[in-house]
Amino acid sequence: MKDCKLSINGRNYNVQVEDKWTLLYVLREVLGLMGTKEGCGTSDCGACKVLVDGKAMNSCTLLALKMEDKEITTIEGLGNSDKPHPIQEAFVEAGAVQCGFCTPGMVISTKALLDQKSDPTEEEIREGLSKNLCRCTGYVKIIDAVQLAAKKVKELK
Amino acid sequence: MTVNFKVNNKKVEIKDLDNLSLLKILREHLSLKGAKCGCKTGDCGTCSVIIDGELVRSCLVLGKNLEGKSIKTIEYYKDEKIRELQETFTRSGAIQCGFCTPGMIMAAYSILEKNPKPTKKEIREGLKYNLCRCTGYEKIVDAIYDASGQVNTKKHIIASVFKGNIGTSKPVQAALEKAEGKFEYTDDLVFNNLYHGKILFAPSAHGYITKMNIEEAKKIEGVLDIVTCMDQEYWSKDFNCHITSPFEKLVRNEKMFNRHFRYDGDKIAAVVAISEEIAQKAVKAIEYEFKTYPVILDVKKAMKDDSYPIQKDNNIAARNIGYEIGNVEDAYKDCDILFEKEYHTQKQSHGMMEPHIAVANYDGEILTLYAPTQNVFGFRSLMTEIFDLPYNKVRVIKTNIGGAFGAKSEVVVEHIASLLAIRVKGTVKVNLSRKEEFLCGKTRTAIDFNVKFGVKNGKFKSMGIDAVLDRGGYYGSTIDLCYAWMDKVYKLYECENIKTNTIAIYTNTQNSGAVRGYGAPQVNFARETAINDYCRDQGLDKIQFRLDNLFEQGSKDIATKETMTSVYVKDCLTRAYEMIEEKRNKWEDENYYYGLGVAVGVHGNGIGLPVADFASSSIKYCADGSVIVNTTVHDMGQGSTIMIKKIVAEVLGIDDDLVTVLNPDTNSNYYSNGAYATRETWVNGNSVKAAADELIKVIINETAEIHEKNIEDLIYLDGKIATKAGDLVATAAEVVLHRMHKPPFKEIEATVHFTNPQVPGSYMANIVISKVDKKTGEVKVEKLIAVHDVGRAINPMMLEGQIEGGIHMGLGFAISEEVKYDKKTGKLETINFKKYKMFRANDMPEIHIEIVNKPDSVGPLGAKGVGEAALTAVAPAVIDSINEAIGSNFNKIPVLQKDIQEFLGL
């Protein structure tokens, strides 16, 4: 076991980790942050996306020890049901949530996308979410949600 | 500091856990949750482990002292001796709630390591650091004796066996998991993003909070919210912790936090934080000022008109509750002899091994409460009332219970956990320490009785019993308890004229609540001791006097005039007297005085009038012939799950392993009242029996339709449907499968709403031999005979287990247990198991149990309940044995060593 200092959602954690532990494993099993989901474990589905220094990355293939000195944001860091993030509001309002398993990853990817492009085109949205799989929605309402989210975020600014 | 040690032969390294107890390290850092926390002060032994071959209570060992140690815990399945003990504990019925079991097994392991062939006495000595509140230790001693390879000659009670389900013994549900430490109690469950609540208790026994400042406490990092008695929102609404339905018109005079606090376990604030430690720190940081009011502990003082009002107007919670049959005063005039005397009983604690705990989650819409409760529907009703939520937005799920005995039938922390969860919109656990449990848990109602009776020609002619109840600070279950004790007066002895009267009083003590027996052990102590005193005064044979007066088969309840469904109390007494070799009332030798004590008793089954007691049950036949029973029984180790399985299996003629019973959950289960009033065997048992009978009708109907036969020509037998001529038509499984795969598609099930027609009596006789040390005044109960009339035994081994556990509680009630307060300040003195003395394994007497084994006419397959009857007659028999032995006239329990010393002038 090695000491590992992680900065997650603005809070510093000192955890003991094995060399092989992924960030996803540490988030879920060590820190109990269960919002981030494991859909494949091979970086193909995007359910486990978190923001690493603002970039949406699959936490299932990141080693926890390599995450020191980086700023990590998980779905729990964006908002909660009392104070939802506008993106989360938009997903709910647009009906983009069905089973909900891909949703945290989708929201994280949306956040990364909107941070780069505040007013993306539909094509850009589809491209931005291309690393996230969804089996329920056919992506139609997810695209709507991202557009709505872009509007909401802009209004806030 | 880094510490290296071994747990179950595996290397472990811990860092910076120097001052954490081994128990916490095992449970929280190593996920070994077999060891339980019953007290944290080394008094109960539920956390016992082996360190370097020595039995140790892990709550007392610190992380920094573990270097190089080798620890064995209940999880060490590779150790053959541990495995063997787990099996013998399971097989012997040594497991009820199971909370003490892991610690007991480690103690047993240590005993056998040191002495592979111990005597039973040596086993009892070796278990003296481990408390158990369920079993009376009998079967635990048997299990260890068995594991030592010695032949146990003790036999279980003899019961009638029919198809092989009823009358055969089986351990309680999940007994082996309990023995292995795998059975998860509420504190063992894992919840994500769990917050912790801690309670601030009142600073004294009576007063008023004038100021409170939570600013400093709020600043502590990790504190999420603080609620106090100064807030005026919904949590300051009046409620009654005993309410089982918002429609119940009981007096509501308790708040979640009481600014006017009425005992020193009253709650005045609560903190929710990210850890228990932070919550506790914040509780300590709450500043407040208060003024004190006079502390009234004595009911006689509290009753006076000029006494300081604990509740609004005066200290009378209820008065003139009672009823008269015949004309008692007139009849006294016609008697040969009158007898009158006062009797007093004390407050008794439940002492279950698992203190109160609850986890509540609020997601913004639904409040979900996970609690080891005896009454899921009652708790749901109360939460809907307190939080103004609809029924469908409150879900109560019963978690595994580590003993309850009535404690977990009224809310103690569940509403606090719920409030905090609603406040933070998350998941909150409130887990009481043993001291907090003693402080704010309920107690048995202390009662002062005046017993008067008149006898004519050797028979009762007239009887009047008046009672003054000490109810503590709040109304709670006052009215129910009044009726509960009075009910028992009318169903034991023949007497044409009987009256009862109750006054219930508020004092600055803990709120009295439901404790196993619910008024019956109290009144039974008073009445039976009065009869013993009378017989001694008059030089009468106390056995014969009883036989001349007791109910018998055909007797009618004196109040309701209904014929009792079965009464074999005379058989109980006659048999108990036969079983005792020494028939003198008293004798002595050089060192001891000996006495023989006698008592009989009665307990009800189910909630009495005016409340209708009912339970719904639904049974579904699955496509493979197994069945699922939806009824609400709260198993807490008393064995109600197995009881239900056996009844259903017996009626349907299938193996009880083919029956599954749902765990109580208000979202999925059919309604029933809770596990109290010795009602589950009688009411739920009858309810599932009726449902099983109905299911047979349904399946015969379906078979007739499918196979084009006349219903009248078909019979159901042991899972098969045949013609009366004896030709097999189909198996039940085939019928179910047919209906589920061909039109008209349907499931085969039956639902019954069963209302209890009558409250019967479970009867018993206890005979006790005690010896009193001439030099020290110490009492040792040597032998206890218990013969019970509980109808037909469903599960003989666990029936015995219930009686043995009841005897344990009854012995404590007689001579060791008393909730005590400082006479001046009203502060609770009995705050731990050192001060609150429950019987340990080496204190227990030799116990012999039999049942009358005659079926009841209404009980399910002839059975009656035993849960509370188990302890009803213990205390009066013990006190009688002492009074016989030393010639005393004790009329107040507990009779402690100091009382005897005083009497003997030692």
Image (cartoon, helix red, strand yellow):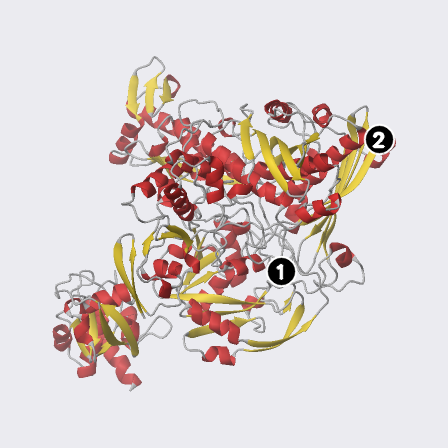
Chain of the residue displaying label 2: B
Dividing the image into 4 quarters, which one contains the N terminus of chain B?
A: bottom left
Q: Is residue B283 left or right of residue B904?
A: left
Q: How many circles with numbers are drawn on the protein?
A: 2
Viewer-proximal residue among B485 and B283: B283
The answer to which quarter of the image holds residue B508 is bottom right
In this view, the mark in front (2 or 1): 1
The answer to which quarter of the image holds residue B750 is top left
Residue A151, horizontal then vertical, whole percent: 25, 80
Viewer-proximal residue among B500 and B800: B800
Spatial separation of the CA atoms under disc 2 and disc 1: 43 Å
Q: Which residue is mark 1?
A: B828
- Residue visible at 13% across and 77% down? A124
Amino acid residing under circle 2 = Ile
- Contact, CB < 8 Å: mark 2 with mark 1? no
The answer to which quarter of the image holds residue B765 is top right
Is disc 2 surrounded by few (<14), some (14 to 19) or many (20+) residues within 10 Å? some
- Residue visible at 38% across and 55% down? B188
Q: Which residue, as the protein is rendered here, is positioned at the far top? A: B725
Above-or-below relation of B363 to B189 = below
Q: Helix, strand or loop at disc 2?
A: strand
Residue B690, horizontal then vertical, whole percent: 46, 31
- Residue visible at 66% across and 37% down? B591
Q: Which residue is mark 2?
A: B337
Amino acid residing under circle 1 = Leu
Chain of the residue displaying label 1: B
Q: Is residue B810 left or right of residue B744?
A: right
Above-or-below relation of B130 to A7 = above
Q: Which residue, as the protein is rendered here, is positioned at the far right? A: B333
Viewer-proximal residue among B717 and B874: B874
Is disc 1 surrounded by few (<14), some (14 to 19) or many (20+) residues within 10 Å? many
Q: Is residue B165 left or right of residue B522?
A: left
